[in-house]
Image (cartoon, helix red, strand yellow):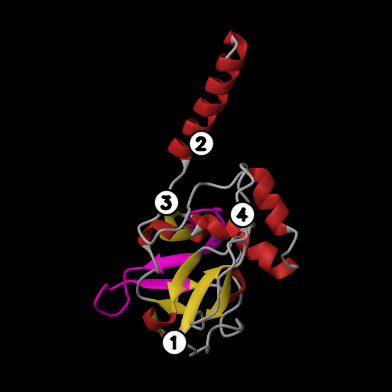
Amino acid sequence: MQEDEFASARRTYLKEENWMAEQKVSRSGFDITTLSKDEIERLAKGLNEEEYRILLDHGTEPPFCGTLLDNKKDGTYACRLCGLPLFASKHKFDSGTGWPSFYTPFDKDHLTEIEDISYGMRRIEIRCARCGSHQGHVFPDGPAPTGLRYCLNSASLEFFDENGDIPQKAQKKTGLDPSSFK
Ligand SMILES: [Zn+2]
């Protein structure tokens, strides 16, 4: 191998190593590497106005209006923007608040918690750990066993039946098939 060929092969190798080091995988085996701004913008093209307002502009939908509030089917609630599973039907409960509520997430690694002091209240905002989209808030007044209430917007979630596949919408820079993502 020529000297410069070797150097270029090594550079490529190191780049890949680097990428591997940056890749984050959740406890349940999903890729939770932070998406790039470009990728988020590409995914956001598939949203309607209300979804965009909630997911990217941190909006809240009015209570008792969301389509998933009374959904009692067995399955998984995934991030509407990137498809990361965020909640499971077995953890859903009727909180009486008018928003879909869960007492624990699908996988703690799939949510980022951020202190939110807007509107003169101190609340913990929850965001999708992969794409950073706004999901709702978590409050310390939920039922056993966690005592937590994850209060969600229907518009930020997409429901998938128990046996349905959950498409992982984000694409990798390496050109890997997004279905190999899980
Ligand atoms: Zn997401």
For disc 2, does the CB lie below 8 Å from ligand 1? no
Q: Is residue 25 above or below residue 71?
A: above
Q: Residues within 10 Å of mark 4 (few under 14, many from 20)?
A: few
Query: For the residues marked 1 and 2, what is the alpha-carbon distance in whole angstroms?
Result: 45 Å
Q: Earlier in the sequence, mark 1 or mark 2?
A: 2
State the separation of the CA atoms marked 4 and 3: 16 Å
Q: Which mark is residue 96?
A: 1
Q: Residue at x 57, y 22 (%)?
A: 9
State how far apart marks 1 and 4 are (Cα).
41 Å
Mark 1–mark 4 contact, CB under 8 Å? no
Which mark is nearer the camera, 2 or 4? 4
**What kind of element bears circle 1?**
loop
Proximity of marks 1 and 2: CB atoms separated by less than 8 Å: no
Where is residue 72 drawn, in percent x and y?
A: 48, 90
113 shown above or below 63: above
Type of residue at label 3?
Val
Name the residue furthest top. Answer: 3
- Give the residue number, with chain letter if any, for mark 2: 19
Q: Residue 110 vs residue 165: left or right?
A: left
Of the two numbered discs 4 and 3 on the same chain, state the one appearing first in sequence.
Answer: 3
SS label for mark 4: loop
Q: Residues within 10 Å of mark 3 (few under 14, many from 20)?
A: some
Left or right: residue 27 versus residue 144 is right
Boundaries of the magenta span: 128-151
Classify mark 3: helix, strand or loop.
Answer: loop
Q: Is residue 150 above or below residue 117?
A: below
Mark whose residue sits in front, 4 or 3: 4
Label 3 sits on residue: 25
